[in-house]
Image: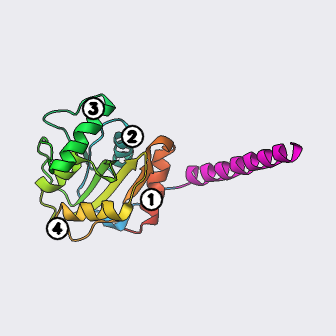
Amino acid sequence: MDILLYIICTILFLFTIITTLKIIELKNIEYKKPEILSGKRILTVYYSNGSNTKNVAQNLHSITGGDIKEIELTENYPKNIFKMSNLVRKQIKEGYLPKIEEIDISDYDVIFVGTPIWNFSISLPVKAFLKNNNFENKILIPFFTYSGGTCKNKILNEFKDYTNVKEVKKPLSMFENGIFMVKEQIIKWLNNENY
């Protein structure tokens, strides 16, 4: 029993040290504006059924500047998560994309697009946004939040499939239930991607 308690205490101690070091690393990070954003007109667009993707979008926008727009549905999804999930599964099966309010992207060079992940896929409102717009000569940089599993390559391919963009940049992905120090994580992602 004493050995088991010793092992548990050691693991907790090591976890605390590692977490503290990660927090210190993130707190000391400084934003260096990537060259790809310099002198560009930037738009952050997002859909958020809850608050996680919206939180990331607002923090990203506060760092990179430009404009921010939320994808709005002409008819909202049910608030009840079970009803919404059933409706989304049905819409996916039928290939249905919801109607959204128009967002004009023609004046922008760089577009950050944020989505929650639904059933290992881009949310349907974001798919509708991507399909409804011309991304030719645009730089598309996705970001997404998720609470279950995700497949980054599949998500990147969906961004490519729904647009005419030449290249989709490496996305920022954040686990919904563990989002803390969002701004610092975004800065680290922007600094490390060498855009």
C-alpha gap between disc 4 and disc 3: 39 Å
Q: Which residue is mark 1?
A: 189
Q: Are marks 2 and 1 in contact (CB under 8 Å)?
A: no
Q: Secondary structure at mark 3?
A: helix
Camera-nearest residue between 55 and 173 = 173
Q: Note whether 176 is above or below 64 in the view shown.
A: above
Question: Is 100 on the left-hand or right-hand side of 171?
Answer: left
Q: Which residue is mark 2?
A: 52
Q: Residue at 23% of width from left, 57% of height from top?
A: 41
Question: Is 106 on the left-hand or right-hand side of 46?
Answer: left
Asked whether residue 107 is in view, the answer is no
Q: Are marks 4 and 1 in contact (CB under 8 Å)?
A: no
Camera-nearest residue between 12 and 85 = 85
Which quarter of the rendering shows the N terminus?
top right
Q: Position of residue 76 (x, y in %)?
A: 19, 32
- Mark closer to the chain start, 4 or 2: 2
Give the amino acid type for the residue marked by disc 4 in the picture: Asn
Please identify the quarter of the rendering in which residue 83 is found: top left
C-alpha gap between disc 4 and disc 1: 23 Å
Give the amino acid type for the residue marked by disc 1 in the picture: Trp
Q: Which residue is mark 3?
A: 83
Q: Residues within 10 Å of mark 1 (few under 14, many from 20)?
A: some
- Mark closer to the chain start, 4 or 3: 3
Q: Residue at 27% of width from left, 50% of height from top?
A: 66
Camera-nearest residue between 47 and 66 = 47
Q: Can residue 14 be found in the magenta stretch?
A: yes
Give the amino acid type for the residue marked by disc 2 in the picture: Asn
Q: Are marks 4 and 2 in contact (CB under 8 Å)?
A: no
Q: Secondary structure at mark 4?
A: loop
Q: Secondary structure at mark 2?
A: helix
Query: Where are the magenta residues, as a range?
Result: 1-29
